Structures are given as structure tokens and as C-alpha cells.
Amino acid sequence: MNTLANQHCITIREQATTISVEQLKASLDAFVSEIKKSDSSTMNITLIKQIVSSLTYFSSKNKQLAGSEFITHPLFIILRDSVVVDYLRQRQNKDISYELLSDLSALFANISRHINNTNAHLFKQLLFHQPLIDELTNCLNEIGINGKYLDDFLLLNSIHFLLMAYQYFNRLQSIANEYSSMTSMCLAVIKCLCSSYSIEMIKKLENNFSQKLNHDHILLLSTCPLYLKWYSTNRDLNLFLQIPRILLSPFTQWMINCPSDSIIYCSKDVGNILRHLHNVLVRPIEWENDNISNEEFYNDYCKLVSHWSSFLSSALNYTSDDSDIISIKRFIVQHLYDFTLQPNILNFMKTIPNLIPMLLQMTDVQQDETQLNTYCCLGKLMSEADIKTMASPSKITGVYVKFLTNTIDDPKKQGRFYSILLSLKNFVQHDQVKIELIKQNALPLLIRCIIEIEFDSIKIKPIVLEILLALSFNNDASSILRQNTNFMTTIRNLVNNIHSNKSNLQRAAETLLWKLDKEIEAITKLTNSKLHKYDIMISYSHSDRQLCYQIHERLVQDGFSVWIDRDNMHGATMIAMAEAIENSEFVLICVSDTYKQSVYCQSEAHYAFERRCHLIPLIMKPCYKPDGWLGIMVSGKIYVDFVKLEFSLAYEKLKKEINQYRQLNMNYSMVKSKENNHQDISSIISKPVEETSILSGRPSIIELPHCITQWTNNHVQSFFRTNGLDNTMFLLCSQLDGHRLLELYDICMINRESMYQSLKGELADVHHRSLPISDYLTFLHEIKPYLPLMHTTSQSVSSSLPSSRVCKLM
């Protein structure tokens, strides 16, 4: 044994956590010198094994080897070329030391765990060596085509560790586009994963999650899909869709044959297979962002998500605070969340009995990570009504704010920070969450992400702007944003940056700036002109585009002039959208979950709503019922269900709605024309039947119970008549009882301006009357004494609202 090399190896081991850069460099230099001196191949192997063993131990205790002084040190270049590349090239030679190849590959993987944006270019010199890539690719191809080496666990181990080193590198999305040389390796990995050997392995798995796995299982079913998860460069979508087309069916069959309670005993290796295969089978591409349908996988996905739900049911039978049980529960919820990202599967999940109640149980698990994953699911599954019935929306928001605060400044947690923002983007659609985010001071954190340059302009800033856009529908939030001069200047600069190619960022900035700066001015410039450039404007989510395109084509065939954002898959600018809304006679609102979740769709619908456009809601998904902001905007409208009805029948119903409105509008215009000519129109047109019956059949004024929840319809009518609102507000509320009138009041208090415009528009459209602002304010003021004790609707509603003494006693 080489005495000098041995001394340095001992020093490295003994001082693994304290050794200085100078000492470590001296040791590596000495190793190179001793290797070059050695003439005996036997001596070389013994010496290199000793060196690799010491450095492997050192790399598990200290990350100094990933420093810029060492990554491209001559020692690692020698080891790469003389051992890794050479041994892979001689892989059919039984005399070579596969154990050394495995140990050295493990060392490279250990060091690669510390790749970051600072040292990535140096790792590229070490790992992106074409002979290494070629030999590894050839080896993978032989495994995928012929099943070679599947019984050689040391060679399989070596391939596993090398792929792990590359996947650590691929995680750096900001530099991934440089690596076209990796395409051949990616294809070879897919070939292995989709091979007949992988299929047979899945079919022969035992029906439990605690079985012992071999090295070939781990390489093909765990390492290969993990590598592909982080390979994002120039993804060939059809190539990646090949994976679920081949493996999804056998994987699903194995999963559903495993008893639900066996998930509790899931081993680490089987858990990795589940996690990594699940990613390439359920999320081979981002379905919402690509023009590809996942319908061909629908049945298997439904079976899988149902079985994951049964896993959750079994796990909830274990109430222990044991960390392993909590980890299993979190593991299950993470997989359920993946399914919520697919709109059609999300709709199916809403039909699974007890899924939401089970997830609500999970919010009681005293572990922040588990709670966050649970809220990620609930944010997709729950309706506005569900959120309001939760014990404490503040608890949900508190978890998000805590995680945002803990990750925003930690470079190592930027992936987690991004994931939290993605989840928050789903949850912020709910009004209760908006209110809590403002109350818990989340806005300054989000504003920082836009103002400070160190936040990623491709991933972080666009999502944050979309969250802020959703928040801007709350008056308090929009006021805070407008008053922040630095923030407003920043988004103006983003909008005006003509050299930027960050289309998502600019679109988000432009829409938010329009909402904060231009929307109020545009709404106040309402025009009564009956001349429209377009008959119809279609507002839709791109996930519903196929059905919307079919409707568009049929309308055009029938001679309608239609505006639709069809050519630009990233969406037209908000200015173009606003102009289309202003110049269209009808706006078709294509309602679905994804429509409600899109802040861009909300911006379009909100502007059309405020402009008092004639809205026609079209149902895009089975059993979908609009709620929250979308439910308010389309309430009282006639729905056209393009899912429940055959397309031709639904389309005819749509045309009938358009024609009826035009006929009504024409009749009303004729009446107004005669009014303007000072003609007596009493014999030409009578008041609407509903209004006539309301006005003629009023009860006399009666004494009102002191609490609104006790009011009948007669009490409601008496209230409006007493306050002189019988010709305006009463016409809109003639069918309400006290409970429903209280709901209307709550909606008004959440957004007074928006609801005034809504009620004003409905009164004009249905009853051809105007709603004076004084009548609206009288309603809001006079109803206060009848509110229940401590009744509040939002953060902006004062807790000091007057209430009657009887209500207080009750």
C-alpha cells in the first residue's frame, strides 16, 4: 500500500468536517502524483480504491469537493476517464472491477448533490464529457433492447448512481436548455422504462408495498422515471406520452390489487417506485399547458385516484402521532394532489364519497408539511360554500404564510417556494382566503417577489403576479397595491419592456396594471350605443378549447361575427379583450372549474359584468355548478349546458336565447322611441307580468321581527315599502325571505361597487328602470338594525355594525 497516499486518506477521514481547503487540495494533488508514479495496474486499482473510499466517506460529511477549486481537479478527470469511461467501455469484460466502478459512480453522485447555479458550469466540464455520455447511453440501450446486464447488480448500481448525478444537474431548470447532448441518453432511458422487461417487472410485483426489490427493479422502475422527471429540455410530448400508453395499464392493475391497508407498511424502495412512476404516468406533461387530451387515460386515472382515496381512508384509522404514519398520510395526499391538476379527473374526484371530509380530517395532523399538502388538495376540490363552512379559513392562510416566510429567502428551498406559490394560486380564488391573506400581511411578501430582481422572472414572478391579480378583486388589496409606488413603477416597466421575451410575465403584468389603472375609468365610460363590431365574444379557459372552438365554428357558419382568442395560445392582451367586450352584443361565459380558477378569465368576466354586457353562461363540464365570484356573475341567467344536451340541441338553445334577447330589446327600443315622441304608450306596452303582479298584490305594511333571519317574504316586501324602495330594490328582491336577503346583503358588503353595477344592470334589463345610488345606499343602511348578533361578511365590514337589542338577546 502506498504510504504517502495512505497518510492523506487517513487525514481526510479523520478531519472530514474540519479540513481546510489548502489541506484538501494538497491531498488531491498528492493522489494525482502517486497515481502517475505507479506502473503496476494492480497497484493502481488498489490505490484508486483506497482514494475513492476515503473521498466517498468525506463527501458524505463535507460538501467541499463541490467547490470550484475541486470539481475539475485533475484527480476527478483521471478517475472519470481511466475508470468510469474505460470500465463502461469494457463492460463485457468480466475481469474488470465493477465494485470500483460502482464506488466511483457513487462518489460522483454524492458530489453532484451540491450542484447549484454558481458551480454548474464546472460540473458540466466533469459530467458532460461526450465519451462518458456515449458509453452510458450505449449501456442503457443494451438493457432496454436485450435486457443485458440485468443480473449484474454492480453495473446496475453504477448506472443508477451516474443517472442520479445527471438528474441533480437537470434540476437546475435555468440552465437546462444548454444540454442538447443529453437527448440520446434521455431516449435510452425512455427505452429502458418502456421495455418489455419493465412491463414484466410490474406484472410480477407482489400485491403489497413491503416487498423486497432487486437492483434491476430500482434502476428501471425508480431511477429511470426519476431522471425523466427532471429532464425538461425540448421534451417531445408524444415521446413522453408513450410511457403511460405502455405502462399505465399494468401499473394500475398492480396498484388496485394491493389491499388498501397495505400502504401503511410501504417500504422506502417501493415508496420511491410509487412516487417516481406516478410522476411519469400521471404527469408526463403539464396537461393544462399543452394542446393534448388525457382522455385516453381517463379510466385508469379514475381507478387509481379511487384507490388512493381508499388508502387515505385506511391511513386515517391510525391516529398515532408516529412519524412513519404521518409520512404515509402525507405521501398519499401528495399523490391525490397530482390528480387534481387534470380538470376531468378533478371533476371525478369531487364525486368520490367522503374524500373532502377525509382531507379535512388531515388538516388536524400536527405537521406543517402534511397540512400544506392537504390544503393543496382542498384548494382544488372545495367550493366557495365548502370554504365558508370550514372552522377557520385563517388556519389555511396561516399555513401558507408560514411556509412562504420560511422559504422566500432560502436559496435551497426555492423549489419548495415555487410549489407553495402554485398551490396558493389555486386557493386565492376563494374570497375568504383573499381576506385572510390581507389580514395576515401576506401582501408585502408577494410584492417583494416582483420588486426585487433576484426572484426568477420565468417561474416565480408570473405566478406571483397572477396571485396579486386575484387579490386585486378585493378592494382593500387593490388599494394597497395602488399606493405602493415602487410596485406600480415595477409592473409598468415590465409592461413597457419591449425587449422582453417573457410573454407570461408581461401578460400577467399588463393584466394587473390594466385592472389597477384602467378598469374603473373604462367602466365609468359606459356607452348606450347599439352598434357593435361583433355579435359575440367568447370568454373561455384554454382547457375547454375544443368544445369552444366547435361552438365558434358553428356560430360563424350561421353568419355571426365572433371574437375569440384562438390563435394566441398564451391569450390576447387585456386591452384587446376589453375592446372585444366593449364591442360585442353578447359575451358567452364558458363556465368550468378551470375558468373559475383562471385570473385572466375572471378579469374578462368581471369587466363584461361591470359593463352590463348581456352574458350567456355555457356549461363546459359535467355536473358543474358555478359558485363564488363566477356564481354571482351568472346568477339569474339561463344556462346552456353543452355537456348534458347533445351539441345540436344545446346550440339551438343558445341561438334561441340570442334571438329572444334581440326581440325583447327591439320591442323595448320601439317603446322608448314612442316615449321620446311624447306618445301615450299605456295602450302599447304593459309592465312585465311579474312586475304587475308584484305591484298590485302588495300586502299592507306590517311590523317586522327584530332579526332578519325570522323574516318571511311578506316581511321583506314590507321592509322595502316602508323605506320607499318599492319601485327599485323591491323589484329585484320580491321572491326573497329574510335568510336570502341577508345573503344578498353579505355579497353587497364584500364588493359594494360591483354589486351596485350588477343590481343596476339587472333592474335596467328586466324592469327597464334605473337604480339610483341613493336607493342602493338606503337599502344597505336601513337593514343594519336587523342583522344578527356579531354578523360580519369580510375584513372591510366594521365589527361595530348596529344590531337590535332583540338580536343581541337571541
Image (tube, rainbow, N blue to C red):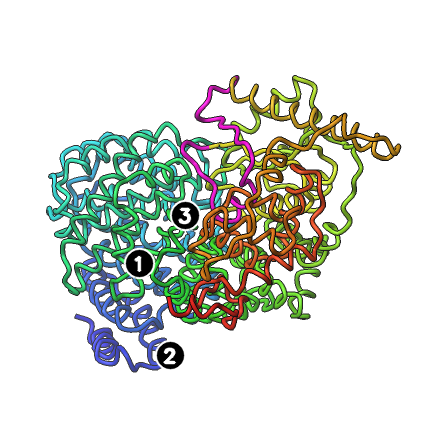
The amino acid type, in three-letter code, at marker 3 is Ser
Classify residue 206 as left or right of residue 758: left
Of labels 1 and 2, earlier in sequence is: 2
Residue 434 vertical position relative to residue 684 in the rendered view, above or below:
below
Of labels 2 and 3, earlier in sequence is: 2
Count of marks, rendered view? 3
Contact, mark 1 vs mark 2 (Cβ under 8 Å): no
The amino acid type, in three-letter code, at marker 1 is Ala
Q: Secondary structure at mark 1?
A: helix
Q: Quadrant of the N terminus?
A: bottom left
Residue 194 vertical position relative to residue 112 in the rendered view, above or below:
above
Q: Which residues are magenta?
A: 621-648
Percent x, y of residue 214: 14, 45
Of labels 3 and 1, earlier in sequence is: 1
Judge whether residue 643 is colored magenta: yes
Q: Nearer the viewer, mark 1 or mark 2?
A: 1
Q: Nearer the viewer, mark 2 or mark 3?
A: 3
Between 70 and 776, the one lying in front of the other is 776
Determine which residue is flagged by label 3.
Answer: 383
Q: How far apart are labels 2 and 3 at the CA level? A: 57 Å
